[in-house]
Amino acid sequence: MPKVETNFFEKVYVLARQIPFGKVTSYGAIAKHLGSAGSARMVGWAMNASHNKSDIPAHRVVNQKGLLTGKHHFDGTNVMQQLLENEGIKVIDNQIQDFEKHFWEPGAIE
């Protein structure tokens, strides 16, 4: 893995660790906050690579519409949904309900 990508991944992880309990953000919002607005896919790659790191809440990162597009990268079929529901976030048909209510803008003060 090129050093640049590794550094980007680490920046993504630092930000992902800041997502509050019961909140979610999007791949694009993370990319934009890091100054790489067109790099949502790379944020997704970082999240996919984070599943061996227990301190990164990858389940809190979804697509811009609140869809659990990364759910197939978790060990079980419904693990991502279960983790979100454990935090009080309702998910129906792989989509977060009341997405705006649960959305966390990176860099926002909670």
Image: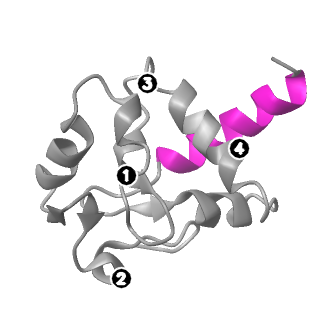
Identify whether 33 is placed above or below 21. Answer: below
- The tally of labels here is 4
| Most frequent secondary structure within the magenta stretch | helix
The residue lying toward the viewer, choosing from 91 and 30, is: 91
Q: Which residue is mark 2?
A: 100
Which residue is at the front of the view, 95 or 15? 95
User: Percent position (x, y) of residue 29?
Assistant: 60, 66
Residue marked by disc 4: 42
Tag 2 near tag 1, CB within 8 Å: no
Q: Residue at x 27, y 67 (%)?
A: 96
Are dots 2 and 4 in contact, CB under 8 Å?
A: no
| Residue 106 in picture, x, y percent from top left | 56, 66
User: Which residue shows up at 63% across the image and 36% down it?
Assistant: 45
Q: What residue does disc 1 label?
A: 60
Could you tell me residue 6's position as x and y percent? 77, 26
* Side (left or right) of 92 relative to 49: left
Other residues around mark 2 within 10 Å, as few (<14) / some (14–19) / many (≥20): few
Left/right of residue 75 with respect to residue 83 in the rendered view: right
Query: Of label 3 and label 4, which has the lower sequence position?
Result: 4
Q: Pick whichever of labels 2 and 3 is earlier in the sequence.
A: 3
**CA–CA distance in space, label 2 to label 3:** 26 Å
Q: Which residues are magenta?
A: 3-17
**Residue 89 in view here:** no
Q: Separation of disc 1 and disc 4 at Cα?
A: 16 Å
Q: Is residue 15 magenta?
A: yes
Please name the residue that numbered disc 3 is placed on. 51
* In this rendering, position of residue 57 left or right of residue 42: left
